[in-house]
Amino acid sequence: VALDRAVPGVVVDLRYRGTDNFVGEPIDGYLSDRCYITAEAARALGRVQHELAHAGLGLKVFDAYRPQRAVDHFVRWAEDLDDTRMKARYYPDVDKRHLFRDGYIAARSGHSRGSTVDLTIVSLDTVEPLELDMGTSWDYFGPKSWPASLEVTPQQRANRMLLQALMIKHGFRPLAEEWWHFTLEDEPFPETYFDFPIE
């Protein structure tokens, strides 16, 4: 389903559609700004969004369903060791040669199954939704992005734990290395990696 239609009020910032991502260019398969996710995951996100709304907060989604062709694009990029144009912003302390070894890039992604989402919390008390400070940007490669990292401030950890607690409460499983990444526990397509483009 289209996330913005299934979960009213959610902010979508599909970063792989543009150039502000770790590759530095639009990613294969992202042909529109529409964000897709399984109906089951959308219903669970709707419950998180509803709970946050009571505090003047909401969800901002960076990525959900990801075509396999996009994952293939990441793999090709990771193999090109000369392309480091986004290193300073997204992986300053990680050697690009080690992205596969360290698990930052893989040939398959749970996103392609449709029930994994990358997201953060935003304050809705401003003219434009303002992201809560999580200590790193989305898709930052390094231990500082781990939800339990002590390299961030207590407030930043508290913001991460708020997001994690609500996502777990409503049926999502967190990832130990990325504060923004969650997969629906009871995902409907656990063995299927879809490749239809986002359009």
Image: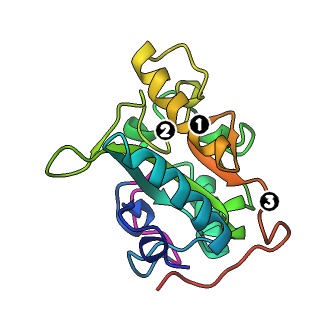
Q: Label 3 vs label 2: CA separation? A: 27 Å
Residue at left offset 60%, top offset 53%:
78
Q: Which residues are magenta?
A: 21-29
> With respect to residue 89, does 185 lie above or below?
below
- Write down the residue under mark 3: 186
Pick the front one: 97 or 158? 158
Inspect the magenta stretch and tell me whether residue 24 lies in it. yes
Packing grade of label 1 (10 A; few <14, some 14-19, many >=20) is many
Color scheme of the displayed model: rainbow
Measuring from the top left, give residue 33's x and y in whole percent. 38, 75
Q: Label 1 vs label 3: CA separation? A: 17 Å
Whether residue 139 is visible to the viewer of this picture, yes or no, is yes
**Left or right position of 73 against 176:** left
User: Which comes before the other along the chain, label 3 or label 2?
Assistant: 2
Residue at left offset 42%, top offset 32%:
136
The amino acid type found where label 2 is placed reads Tyr
Corner quadrant of residue 39 = bottom right
Q: Label 1 vs label 2: CA separation? A: 17 Å
Q: Outermost residue toward the front? A: 54
Principal secondary structure, stretch drawn in magenta: loop
**Left or right position of 76 against 187:** left
Please tell me the numbered disc located at residue 164: 1
> With respect to residue 6, does 183 lie above or below?
above
